[in-house]
Image (cartoon, helix red, strand yellow):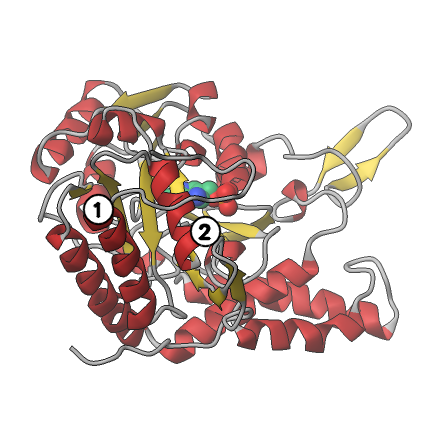
Amino acid sequence: RGEIAPLAALVGADQTAPLVTGGELRYVNLDIAASAPALVAVAERVAEFLPYYSSVHRGSGYASIVSTGAYENARRVIADFVGARFDDVVQVVRHTTDAFNLLARAVPGDVVHLDLEHHANLLPWRSSGSRQVAVAGTLEETLVALDAELAKAPAALLAVTGASNVTGELLPLDRLVAIAKAHGARIAVDGAQLVPHRRIDIEAAGIDYVAFSGHKVYAPYGAGVLVGRRDWLDAASPLLLGGGAVREVSTTGVSFAATPARHEAGTPNVVGAVAIAAALEELERIGEDAVVAHETALRTRLVDGLRQLPGVRVLEIWPGEAEVIGVATFSVEGFSAEQVAHFLSAEWGVGVRDGRFCAHPLLARLNGGRTAVRASLGLGSSSSDVHRLLAGIDQLVTHGPEWTYGVDGLPSVD
Ligand code: PMP
């Protein structure tokens, strides 16, 4: 069990965190699933692009031509990375939440989804005829329940996550595609947690739409994508009204442009799109096999270590049944999730996430609605990061809450 070094350099990897005791330690970021710091390779590409910052699509100057080319090239890189069909559209949006809000206004019928979803892949459907299926005790029973719901009445879309943001469990997309197709429904995949960790080939897999966020694929905040079939999106009313989304505006009337311009009114986030493309090219260069090997080895250490600690319970939807990405959510008996997270930060310089992870129905199922702690790994994570977290939890469960914060606003635990 040797040391596992980071697989790629991330911006800010050498930051330190001030401790409540007065010292400081290298900051250990185990909250990668929320937002992954940018890859150094992405930051470099963005810096190269910035001198060409100029009007996009509308200017005829040299820098405008370069900016427009960079934006449209980013679309092509993104399409290639997810294996899009030649006539699919790549909509640059703000994030996954935006992508599903856009698709929800375009979907011409009911949407079937599970209750394990992130709110971004759950709430938008409520405005368009959502039929929610409860997760069953086993994966197999859950697939049967989905199939039965789709058989009950026609649905336009099955919307499903590729990987749970709470437990890291992967959903069997091949089986889900088969179920959707058998009932004449399209399938949309929430790739927010999947795309940073696993390749997806939407044409080969028969997936109709995939959405993901730049800030989870090691690019900056503020841009995400929806990739998939054009027809529903061409028929939908524009996401925003304004310049860029129109073909012609008369004194009183307007005709709208086709996709992607139709849903990209206003000046687009060119830097965001360029950064996503750079991140995907870097992921491609590193290779899926290396990413999976790195994250699996680290997650195994993390979960094995957590399970050895008394009172620590790792949450799972279908224990032992599904493959997992580098995410582990757990509770520590006798401590609230907030206490655990604050302790790890203040005393050990470790950043984790506590809460219900924008998946309240799933936390109700797995943890009685209580908050939990999530540690999540990525390309920049190392075995020493995992060991720091385990040492912190070990101190907490072994010695109890013997610390004093001396910092206003942090919870005190006696
Ligand atoms: N889906 C999943 C599975 C997620 O983990 C997240 C982010 N936590 C989202 C959707 C929403 O992503 P964003 O906040 O970038 O819109």
Q: Which residue is mark 2?
A: 346
Q: Quadrant of residue 11?
A: bottom right
Q: As drawn, is 46 to the left or to the right of 316? A: right
Residue lying at the far right of the rendered structure: 251
Q: Secondary structure at mark 2?
A: helix
Residue 330: image x %, image y %? 24, 43
Rendered residue at 58%/59% (across/down): 220
> Which of the 4 image quarters holds residue 353?
top left
Q: Residue at x 24, y 66 (%)?
A: 298
Q: Is residue 237 visible?
A: yes
Q: Amino acid at mark 1?
A: Val
> Which of 127 and 371 lies nearest the eye of the viewer?
371
Asked whether 104 or 388 is in front, the reply is 388
Image-based side of 393 in relation to 44, left or right: left
Looking at the image, which residue is at 57% across and 72% down?
42
Where does ligand 1 appear, by image quarter? Answer: top left
